[in-house]
Image (cartoon, helix red, strand yellow):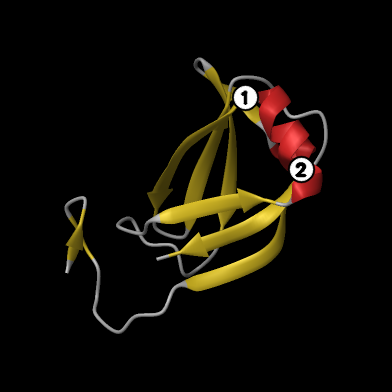
Amino acid sequence: MKIAGVTIASGGSPTVLANETLSNAGWSVSGDYYIYTFSNASIMPSSVITFTPNNASVTVCSTAMMMPQISTSAGTCTFYAQYSPGDDIIGTLTIQ
């Protein structure tokens, strides 16, 4: 099956990582955005990543203007924000 041009293997279950922390110290400036690189061996270049912040982190995400795009490569994914987050961001990361 394909979703948005990405082949999804049938029968595959997503990897769900609950309560993952994106440390506020881990963000760095790259071009027009702050970026955060998250590492996990399950992430592939064709992975579709979703991140849902815990309720306690929503204000931090909003204030930093965290972007919806999450880029992937082998073993890592990159998050983007307009401003440096003022605190850690905790949430659930799903790798499909």
Marked residue nearer the N-terminal end (2 or 1): 2
Q: Which mark is residue 65?
A: 1
Question: Picture quarter containing residue 28?
Answer: top right
Answer above or below: position of 30 versus 94: above
Q: Is residue 39 left or right of residue 22?
A: left
Question: Picture quarter containing residue 10?
Answer: bottom left
Give the residue at mark 2. 57
Which residue corresponds to the image point at 50% horizontal and 17% vertical from the top-left? 31
Answer above or below: position of 67 versus 39: above
Which residue corresponds to the image point at 62% horizontal and 24% vertical from the top-left? 65
Question: Picture quarter containing residue 92?
Answer: bottom right
Answer above or below: position of 32 versus 74: above
Which residue corresponds to the image point at 46% horizontal and 64% vertical from the top-left? 95
Question: Where's residue 76, x and y in %?
Answer: 49, 54
Q: Is residue 49 left or right of residue 23?
A: left
Question: Where's residue 37, x and y in %?
Answer: 57, 44
Q: Is residue 82 left or right of residue 20?
A: left
What is the spatial separation of the Cα atoms under label 2 and label 1, in whole angstroms?
Answer: 12 Å
